[in-house]
Amino acid sequence: MINVTKSYLPPLEEYAKYLERIWASRWITNQGELEQELQEKLRAYLGVPHFQMVSNGTIALQIAMRALEVTGEVITTPFSYVATTTAILWEHCTPVFVDIEAKTFCLDAARIESAITDRTSAILATHVYGYPCDVEKIAAIGRRYGLKVIYDGAHAFGAKLNGLSLLHYGDMATVSFHATKPFHTIEGGGVIVHTPDLARNVGLYKSFGHIGDDYFTMGINGKMSEFHAAMGLCNLPRMADFIARRRELSRQYDAGLVDAGLEFPVKPPNIEYNYSYYPVIFPSERQVLRVKVELAKNGVNARRYFYPSLNKLPYLKGADCPVSEDIASRVLCLPLYYELDPADVNRITGIVRHACGR
Ligand SMILES: *Cc1c(COP(=O)(O)O)cnc(C)c1O
C-alpha cells in the first residue's frame, strides 16, 4: 500500500543512542535535556527569536490564541485542516470564514476587511501546503484594525519567503511536527514568538501555568517528552535531504502530468518551497472520485486534502466560500514522501492520466 505520506524513521541505532541518554538521566519529560536541545536547534534552524516546543500543532494554536488574548470573532480560512477551525472553537471564539485566493488557496487578504466587525480580535490564516499567505497585506490590516495575526504554519516548516522562514511572519506562528508532516517528532509542534514576555507566557501555558511553587496563570499540558524530542533530534539534520528529495519527486509528477488537463496552485515569487504536499486540481469532483478509486484499486491511497471546505462542517453555520468549496471539491493530494520510489511516481501519473482519458 502506498499511502499519501509515510513517516520517516531514522536508523534504529541512531534513535537508541538517544534512548541511552534518557535511560542514563532518568528524566523522561518536563523540560528535559533533549527537549531543550531540540528547541534550541529548531530556533536556530528557523532563525526566529523565540521558539517554544509543544506537544502538537493543535495545542500550539490554542496556546497562541490564549497568549495573544484572542476573543470574540476570528477571521479564518475555510481551506485548511479541521484543527485550524476547531482550535478557534475550543477557545470559545467564533470562526468567521473568508474565502481563499484562487492561485495559492490561502486566505484572500482582499476580502478580510469587509468581514471585520467590532467583535473581531484576530486573523488566523494557514500557509496551506507551505504556500505563503499575503503576509504584508495581512500585517497591514492587522495594524490598521488592531487585530492579532496568527499563522497556522503546520505545513510551513522548511519553507522561506524573502529569505526568512515563513514561520517568522505574524504576531505568532504555529507549526506541527506530527508523523504525517515532512519533519516529525511523532507528535509535536511549536509556537514562534517575537518577544521575551510572550515566549515566557507561552512557556507557562504549556506547563500548567506555574514554575515550581509559583502559580501565574491557568495553563494546560502542552509539554513534549524526551522520546518525542529524540525523534526530532534524529530527523532534523536530514531536513535538507527531505526537501531535496521531495523536490525531485514533485518535478517528476510535474513532468508526468504536464498535459493531463489538470490545475495546480501557483507558487508566488520570492519563495523557497518545502514541497510539503503534491496537490492536484481535477476538472470536476466526479473525476477526483474516479481517480481516487482507480488509485485505490492499484494500492495507492491519495487523500482529499482539504475536504470539506471548513465553512461546511456539519457543526457550524459558516458563510458561503465559493472558491474554497470549489477547490475542496476538486483537489486530491498525491503520495509524496522521502522514501517514495520514483517508479511508483511513474505508475501513479500513469493511472491518473489514464483516468483523465489521456
Ligand atoms: C497537521 C495540522 C494541524 C494539527 O497539527 P497536530 O500536530 O496534528 O495537532 C493543524 N493545522 C494544519 C493546517 C495541519 O495540517
Image (cartoon, rainbow, N blue to C red):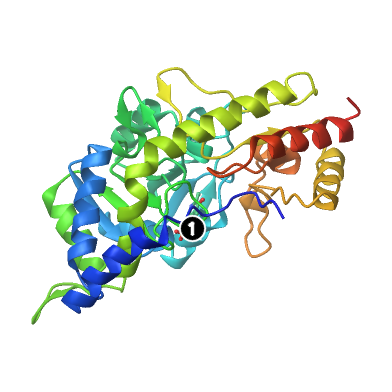
Along the line of sight, which residue is nearer the eye, 245 or 142?
A: 245
Which quadrant is home to the N terminus? bottom right
Figure label count: 1
Q: Is residue 27 above or below residue 196?
A: below
- Tell me which residue sits at (29%, 69%) in the image: 19
Q: Is residue 223 visible?
A: no
Q: Is residue 141 visible?
A: yes
Q: Position of residue 253 (x, y in %)?
A: 67, 29
Along the line of sight, which residue is nearer the eye, 15 or 158?
A: 15
- Tell me which residue sits at (80%, 22%) in the image: 261
Q: Position of residue 255 (x, y in %)?
A: 68, 21
Which quadrant is home to the C terminus? top right
Question: Would you identify the image quadrant in which residue 352 lies?
Answer: top right
Q: Which residue is mark 1?
A: 179
Q: Residue furthest right?
A: 357
Question: Would you identify the image quadrant in which residue 315 lies?
Answer: bottom right
Indicate left or right for 212 with 315 as reference.
left
- Tell me which residue sits at (71%, 41%) in the image: 332
Type of the residue with mark 1: Ala
